[in-house]
């Protein structure tokens, strides 16, 4: 960098032309400084070398906006000087030369630049004042036309005094789309590039550049779409269409309408809808006549048609909210958003393309009428299809009265008045909820609107809108304070830009995702076949019949009320610690082992008494009741004592002999003061999470469980049966503890979501108290599970047991497979190898246990059968999407080739060349 600042090696001759440097050059502008006695160099030419004034002007005849530096002889540094000060000008119409009809000096025939128009020019490196010489040859083109032909965009169409280079406009447009740079910051950047010290002295031409950007982007989009700016544009003519979505008789395969019913997913349009309140409009008043250049022609739906339908819907439909049967949504008037323009609703296809006419402004909150109209508008090119797959974060409510609302809003009389909508005759619609939003719904919704379970869902996640919002929400800081028309122009351009980027990447996306989907399908098919081989054809046939009935009913909202999901286990089928104990008892009796049966019951009763004792101890310590309540507590204590005495008798009969036998063989441990009990015995868990803080039982307690004894005692052969039974029963306790934890985590997530949606002291104070209590219960449930797990480790459970893993705080997150335990991405995860053989289920003799295992296996099969179906749909649909994409590209290519030929015949050679490109 220092080398770039070095002085010229020679100051008496020009290194380029070898002419002597003579002060007072006659070619200088009369009003300019006498600068011909030094050398100049260009800051923007990468290989520039010092040269004289004539050379630098000659070399920059076609680069008049470059930043020039001169060598100051007195101050000895490179100083800024404009080409205008060196006598240069911007000559239009003659390849950088002056028009022969322009006035000249009589002496040397140089142009009289005093007749030139001084204009402010925005370029990539700043703002400069330059004389501009317009061509005067006949037939004379307009000033604006001459400027645009030469690469400058005029701020006005009549006698412009400000212009911007097309490269500067393209630079700002690219930055605004990618980095969401606002125009004010860009202008400040150009002013600082012009003068980094006295920036405020640079003339502010923000409004001129603002108009230029808006006009240029609009004209540029019109050229790209093959329409003429300035004429009335047909609806959706400036929107980029998805090449992969099926459009009947355009890009679809011949005979698609006769395709087998099992393949109908290949000819469906998958859409997702969502509201975005970041994209709200400011509250300031704007000119009612301020319309967007792209009005009704871009991603936004037809404004006039929308106003008619929505206003009539508000008059005819009930003003009360539709009753919600699901969560407390922040949409559809269930939220707090309002305002003149409170946000937008957009409709995207499964490929992430904003559908033409698929965006609408929301006024005073989100309501069904807005979504009805924008969905109908976006679906117009696809109405001849047989099936739509639509996802919405509140589809469980939206779909209920959809058909009724459409009939009311789009009557024959209304359709006759609309310009952008010709049909509201929808085909079958299968509604789903996006996978991210699904966890926020109640269980009944999650079962019926899961994109993993719905037929024809094609493994879509239904969250394309959320991805788009993440990319464009930063733009809202620009658009909030814009006028209504300007805002729609910018958003139309933004959606167009995002669509074009998606289209350019679509082929690469297919080439990446198709092999991935094929691999997933292969893995899931193999796994499902492995499961089915261990179950048997008879059971599989029954399940397939049940699955077929589910698929038929779940797509009909009228069948949802009594529809039972096969993807969820029956709630009454669970194995508690009591069931495990009973199972052990019956198993031992069947083998004639009455002592073993009695031992299993005893261990369960001891655990039950232990939990009851801790609970009652807490009640006694905190008792503040009346005499009647005191009598009730005393009666419970008496009953507890009787049960404890009975347990003591059985303990001495069945468990104590085992302990005594072990003590005969195990030497006393001198390091353990509590021998034969374990040293450092931890606080024992209880069945009531609220009682985990009570003191542990005394170590000398005579009714010690096997886990309370020293490891040497536990490992003795005489204790093997008792240790085994306690471990099995405590595993049931661990399952119960995990169930409690899941329940409390799920309810806490619901409370947390409601907390975010509310505001104010009256709402927050009681909610915070409830959430604090819930956190305490969650903490107690975690402690209980960890205590049980520690006991299981003492009883011989390996540290890496797959069923009872260490519980980390990071594991304690709400939801997701029961449906509660499902996670995003589960559809791509293959189960562990140990779950490839289920023959053990059929070998179980106990009917209750077998019923539980079969129910769990049924759910497992249904879920993986659905995943196989979804991955198969995805592979088949993606291949068809690739076929339609190729067809669309061919159609567009032929259309542009036809335009090129017509333009060439009309003598529009530049337009023809652009069409071919």
Image: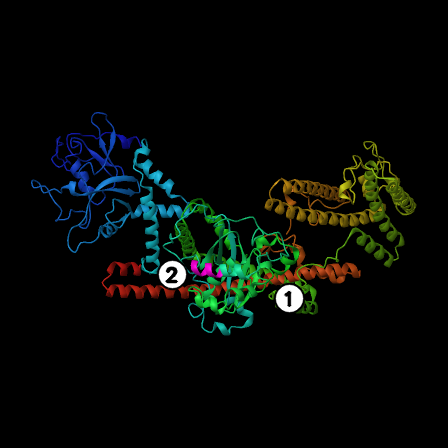
Q: Is residue 892 visible?
A: yes
Distance from the alpha carbon under mark 2 to that under mark 1:
41 Å
Quadrant that contains the C terminus: bottom left
Question: Which residue is at the front of the view, 916 or 485?
Answer: 485
Residue 237 badge: 2
Residue 332 in the image, given as x and y percentages of width and height = 56, 54
Outermost residue, front side? 315
Give, as a single range, the part of the protein colored magenta: 302-309
> Is 902 left, or right, of 24 in this rendering?
right
> Is 372 left, or right, of 914 in this rendering?
right
Outermost residue, top side? 74
Residue 163 in the image, given as x and y percentages of width and height = 27, 45
Residue 535 in the image, given as x and y percentages of width and height = 69, 65
Question: Which residue is at the front of the view, 145 or 416?
Answer: 416
Q: Main secondary structure of the magenta part?
A: helix
Residue 827 in the image, given as x and y percentages of width and height = 59, 56
| Above or below for 641 versus 374 | above
Question: Which residue is at the front of the view, 170 or 266?
Answer: 170
Residue 559 badge: 1
Q: Secondary structure at mark 2?
A: loop
**Picture quadrant where residue 30 is located:** top left
Q: Residue 303: within the magenta? A: yes
Q: Earlier in the sequence, mark 2 or mark 1?
A: 2
Q: Residue 42: within the magenta? A: no
Question: Which residue is at the front of the view, 487 or 173?
Answer: 487
**Mark 2: few/some/many CA within 10 Å (<14, 14-19, 20+):** some
| Above or below for 604 versus 402 | above
């Amino acid at each position: 960098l220092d080398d770039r600042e070095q002085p010229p090696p020679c100051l008496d001759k020009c290194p380029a032309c070898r002419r002597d440097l003579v002060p007072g050059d006659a070619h200088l502008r009369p009003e300019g400084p006498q600068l011909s006695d030094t050398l100049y160099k260009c800051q923007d030419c990468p290989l520039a070398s010092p040269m004289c004034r004539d050379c630098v002007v000659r070399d920059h005849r076609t680069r008049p906006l470059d930043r020039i530096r001169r060598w100051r002889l007195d101050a000895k540094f490179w100083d800024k000087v404009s080409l205008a000060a060196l006598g240069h000008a911007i000559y239009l119409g003659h390849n950088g030369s002056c028009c022969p009809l322009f006035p000249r000096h009589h002496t040397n025939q140089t142009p009289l630049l005093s007749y030139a128009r001084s204009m402010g020019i925005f370029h990539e490196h700043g703002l400069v004042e330059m004389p501009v010489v317009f061509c005067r040859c006949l037939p004379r083109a307009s000033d604006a036309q001459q400027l645009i032909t030469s690469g400058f965009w005029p701020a006005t169409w009549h006698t412009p005094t400000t212009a911007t280079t097309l490269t500067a406009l393209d630079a700002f447009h690219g930055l605004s789309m990618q980095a969401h740079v606002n125009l004010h910051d860009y202008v400040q950047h150009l002013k600082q590039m012009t003068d980094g010290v006295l920036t405020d002295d640079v003339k502010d031409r923000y409004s001129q550049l603002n108009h230029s950007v808006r006009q240029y982007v609009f004209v540029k989009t019109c050229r790209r779409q093959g329409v003429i700016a300035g004429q009335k544009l047909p609806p959706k003519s400036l929107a980029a269409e998805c090449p992969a979505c099926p459009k009947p008789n355009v890009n679809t395969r011949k005979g698609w309408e006769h395709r087998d019913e099992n393949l109908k997913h290949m000819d469906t349009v998958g859409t997702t809808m969502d509201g975005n309140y970041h994209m709200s409009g400011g509250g300031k008043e704007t000119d009612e006549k301020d319309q967007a250049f792209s009005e009704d022609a871009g991603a936004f739906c037809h404004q006039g048609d929308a106003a008619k339908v929505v206003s009539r819907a508000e008059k005819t439909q009930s003003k009360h909210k539709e009753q919600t049967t699901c969560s407390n949504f922040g949409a559809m008037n269930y939220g707090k958003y309002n305002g003149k323009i409170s946000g937008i609703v957009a409709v995207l296809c499964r490929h992430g393309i904003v559908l033409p006419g698929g965006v609408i402004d929301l006024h005073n909150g989100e309501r069904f009428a807005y979504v009805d109209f924008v969905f109908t508008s976006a679906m117009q090119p696809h109405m001849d299809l047989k099936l739509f797959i639509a996802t919405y974060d509140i589809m469980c409510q939206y779909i209920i009265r959809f058909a009724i609302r459409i009939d009311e809003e789009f009557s024959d009389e209304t359709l006759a008045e609309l310009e952008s909508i010709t049909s509201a005759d929808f085909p079958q619609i299968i509604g789903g909820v996006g996978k991210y939003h699904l966890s926020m719904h109640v269980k009944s919704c999650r079962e019926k609107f899961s994109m993993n379970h719905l037929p024809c869902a094609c493994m879509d996640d239904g969250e394309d809108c959320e991805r788009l919002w993440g990319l464009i929400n930063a733009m809202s800081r620009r658009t909030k304070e814009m006028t209504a028309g300007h805002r729609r122009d910018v958003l139309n351009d933004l959606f167009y830009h995002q669509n074009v980027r998606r289209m350019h990447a679509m082929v690469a996306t297919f080439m990446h995702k198709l092999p991935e989907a094929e691999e997933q399908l292969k893995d899931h098919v193999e796994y499902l076949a492995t499961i089915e081989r261990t179950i048997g054809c008879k059971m599989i046939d029954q399940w397939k019949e049940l699955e077929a009935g589910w698929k038929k009913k779940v797509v009909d909202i009228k069948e949802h009320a009594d529809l039972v999901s096969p993807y969820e286990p029956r709630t009454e089928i669970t194995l508690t610690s009591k069931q495990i104990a009973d199972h052990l008892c019956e198993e031992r009796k069947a083998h004639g082992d009455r002592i073993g049966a009695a031992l299993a019951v005893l261990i369960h009763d001891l655990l039950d008494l232990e939990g009851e004792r801790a609970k009652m101890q807490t009640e006694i310590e905190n008792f503040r009741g009346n005499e009647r309540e005191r009598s009730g507590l005393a009666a419970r204590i008496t009953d507890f004592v009787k049960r404890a005495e009975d347990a003591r008798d059985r303990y001495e009969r069945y468990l104590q002999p085992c302990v005594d036998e072990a003590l005969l063989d195990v030497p006393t441990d001198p390091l353990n003061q509590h021998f034969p009990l374990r040293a450092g015995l931890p606080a024992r868990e209880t069945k009531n999470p609220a009682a985990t803080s009570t003191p542990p039982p005394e170590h000398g307690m005579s009714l010690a469980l096997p886990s309370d004894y020293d490891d040497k005692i536990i490992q003795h052969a005489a204790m093997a049966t008792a240790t085994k039974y306690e471990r099995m029963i405590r595993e049931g306790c661990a399952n119960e503890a995990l169930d409690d934890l899941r329940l409390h985590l799920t309810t806490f997530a619901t409370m947390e979501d409601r907390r975010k949606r509310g505001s104010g002291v009256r709402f927050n104070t009681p909610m915070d108290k409830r959430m604090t209590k819930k956190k305490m219960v969650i903490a107690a449930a975690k402690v209980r599970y960890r205590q049980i797990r520690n006991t299981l480790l003492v009883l011989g459970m390996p540290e890496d047991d797959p069923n009872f893993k260490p519980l980390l705080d990071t594991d304690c997150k709400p939801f997701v497979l029961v449906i509660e335990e499902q996670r995003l991405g589960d559809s791509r995860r293959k189960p562990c190898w140990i779950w490839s053989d289920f023959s053990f289920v059929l070998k179980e003799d106990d009917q209750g246990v077998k019923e539980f295992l079969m129910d769990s296996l049924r759910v497992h099969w249904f879920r993986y059968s659905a995943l196989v179906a979804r991955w198969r749909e995805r592979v088949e649909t993606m291949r068809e999407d690739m076929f339609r994409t190729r067809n669309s590209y061919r159609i567009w290519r032929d259309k542009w080739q036809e335009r090129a030929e017509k333009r060439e015949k009309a003598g529009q050679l530049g337009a023809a060349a652009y069409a071919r490109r």
